[in-house]
Image (spheres, rainbow, N blue to C red):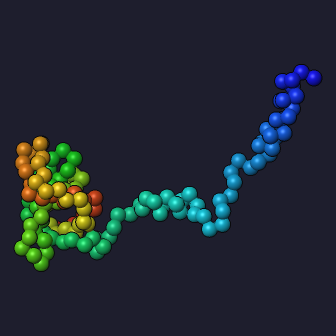
């Protein structure tokens, strides 16, 4: 027999075995389903307002491209804080709760041509009372 034919016969059983295997093997016991894994990695729901640690009253709102900058008077403090969040409609006088985020000192906005003493960038903010 020609050599290529013998080699193809020799490895033919590997092809037959591979075709006989199921296309989708079952995950090991205790392994989450794809839907459960997705829920663990990417929660669908934002946190509840009650779960957000910071609260205050909106004193000023500045919109710039994709961000809204909010000056907030923190509840129970004389401290004011600038918070940046993805552009959203919030009215001055609203009470909001927001998460802790990444803070930047002396943040300069090229678009606004303004330096903020400190800005905290957050992903989640909830309006708890409107003016």
In which quadrant of the rendered image does the C terminus lie?
A: bottom left
| Residue 16 lies in quadrant | top right
- From this viewpoint, which residue is outermost toward the top? 2
Residue 14 lies, in percent from the top left, at 80, 40
| Residue 95 lies in quadrant | bottom left
Residue 19 lies, in percent from the top left, at 78, 42
**Residue at the spot 17% in from the left edge and 56% down from the top edge:** 104
Question: Can see residue 129?
Answer: no
Judged left or right of residue 2, residue 76 is: left
- From this viewpoint, which residue is outermost toward the bottom? 76
Q: Is residue 55 above or below residue 67?
A: below
92 and 121: which one is in front? 121
Judged left or right of residue 64, residue 14 is: right
**Residue at the spot 71% in from the left edge and 47% down from the top edge:** 23
Q: Is residue 81 above or below residue 112?
A: below
Judged left or right of residue 8, residue 84 is: left
**Residue at the spot 66% in from the left edge and 66% down from the top edge:** 29
- From this viewpoint, which residue is outermost toward the front? 3
Residue 87 lies, in percent from the top left, at 21, 52
Q: In this view, does 62 lie above or below 129?
A: above
115 and 74: which one is in front? 115
38 and 93: which one is in front? 38
**Residue at the spot 11% in from the left edge and 48% down from the top edge:** 108
Residue 13 lies, in percent from the top left, at 84, 39
22 and 104: which one is in front? 104
In which quadrant of the rendered image does the N terminus lie?
A: top right
């Amino acid at each position: 027999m020609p050599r290529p034919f013998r080699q193809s016969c020799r490895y033919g059983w590997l092809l037959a075995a591979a075709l006989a295997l199921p296309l989708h093997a079952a995950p090991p016991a205790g392994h989450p389903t794809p839907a459960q894994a997705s829920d663990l990695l990417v929660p669908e729901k934002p946190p509840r307002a009650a779960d957000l640690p910071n609260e205050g009253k909106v004193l000023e709102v500045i919109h710039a491209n994709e961000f809204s900058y909010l000056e907030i008077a923190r509840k129970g403090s004389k401290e004011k804080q600038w918070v940046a969040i993805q552009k959203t409609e919030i009215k001055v006088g609203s009470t909001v709760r927001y998460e802790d985020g990444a803070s930047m000192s002396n943040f300069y906005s090229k678009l606004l041509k303004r330096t903020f003493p400190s800005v905290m960038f957050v992903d989640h903010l909830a309006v708890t009372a409107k003016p």
